[in-house]
Amino acid sequence: MWKLMIHGGAGSMRPGQLDPQQEAAARAGLARALDAGAAILDEGGGAVDAVEAAARVLEEDPAFNAGHGSVLAADGHVECDAAIMDGNGRHAGAVAGLRSTRAPISAARKVMEDSPHVLISKGGADEFAREAGLEQVANSWFVTPERRRQLDELLAKGHDAFDAEIKYGTIGAVAVDRDGHVAAATSTGGLTAKRWGRIGDSPLIGAGTYADDRAAAVSATGLGEIFIRTAAAHEICARMRYCGHDLQAALDHVLDEIGAMGGTGGVIAVSPAGDAAWSFTTPGMYRGLAAEDGTREVAVFGSD
Ligand code: ASP
């Protein structure tokens, strides 16, 4: 049985406090992403294709912090990070600091499939993506007025990326296909007012993204520095393999550890056996689940 789980970031969303229009837009975007990935899995397609398709929908949606609608670095530019991993053989590709490639997750997939490398950064990554035939856009194409306002507000307060109210809008998708192969994809603009050149957890294999047919596929969102220091996504898989934890226990344990280190955020994961789990330390997390048995769920708040 196939399963697909997606997230659009964890944060301080609470019922009654989130702008209704914003909430409706996010829920609709998540539903569209589930549709895109589910259609592939339902036709017998692979997990890698499904997570890329779901991530592409979310990257194009300005409601989320990835692709169009990414948050701005302190210097006013958008720099996108993304990674994709195939649990079947643990092949992986990632890009960091993209400034002109419209589809960061597709660039990550090209790195995985059409290069001998795992992670390519900055100008070299955009050039690789362009040579691979991926569309290039002006950096301003990624920017929305709301993201510009958020940056201006933060800078005016003299705050940096780490003082901001917690609202991580990174997107991710994990899937298990009918053959029992898992895959994970994560894409982000990072943190508002980050230093240019800063790379978060999302494109780092084992931190924000990991997939292993022997354990699970994992995609994270949250304060990237702590997810890097805990090697969070790999740690979840390691706990399953070495400690015999079930998926939910592994997620909860790693998020407890992240919380103890001063981090916040959330994770989604699926296992080759078809288990699916999410966990987050924030009041809410944009998330969705689709499965072959007809399950369709989109949720935002902890209480959903
Ligand atoms: N984890 C991302 C980063 O630190 C941010 C997010 O999840 O929104 O770059």
Image (tube, rainbow, N blue to C red):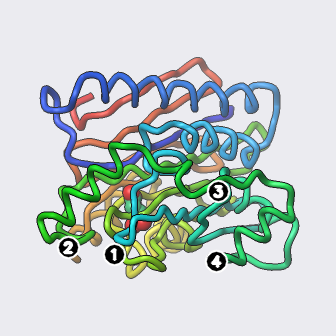
Residue at label 2?
262
CB atoms of marks 4 and 1 within 8 Å: no
Q: Between residue 143 and residue 119, name the one nearer to us.
A: 143
Local crowd size for mark 1, using a 10 Å CA cut-off: few (<14), some (14–19), many (≥20): many
CB atoms of marks 2 and 4 within 8 Å: no
Q: Amino acid at mark 4?
A: Ser
Foreground: disc 3 or disc 2: 3
* Horizontal arrangement in the rendering, residue 265 relative to residue 53 (left or right): left
Residue at label 3?
104
Q: Between residue 108 and residue 102, name the one nearer to us.
A: 102
Local crowd size for mark 4, using a 10 Å CA cut-off: few (<14), some (14–19), many (≥20): some
Q: Amino acid at mark 1?
A: Ile
The residue located at (72%, 45%) in the rendering is 47
Label 2 to label 4: alpha-carbon separation: 28 Å
Q: Amino acid at mark 2?
A: Gly
Between disc 4 and disc 1, whose residue precedes? Answer: 4
Pinpoint residue 284: horizontal percent, then vertical percent: 26, 42
Residue 225 vs 63, above or below: the answer is below
Label 1 to label 2: alpha-carbon separation: 8 Å
Q: Secondary structure at mark 1?
A: helix
Q: Secondary structure at mark 2?
A: loop
Looking at the image, can residue 113 be seen?
yes
Residue 181 vs 157, above or below: the answer is above
- Which quarter of the rendering shows the C terminus? top left
Residue at label 4?
121
| Quarter of the figure with residue 114 | bottom right
Local crowd size for mark 2, using a 10 Å CA cut-off: few (<14), some (14–19), many (≥20): few
- Which quarter of the rendering shows the N terminus? top right
Local crowd size for mark 3, using a 10 Å CA cut-off: few (<14), some (14–19), many (≥20): many
Between disc 3 and disc 2, whose residue precedes? Answer: 3
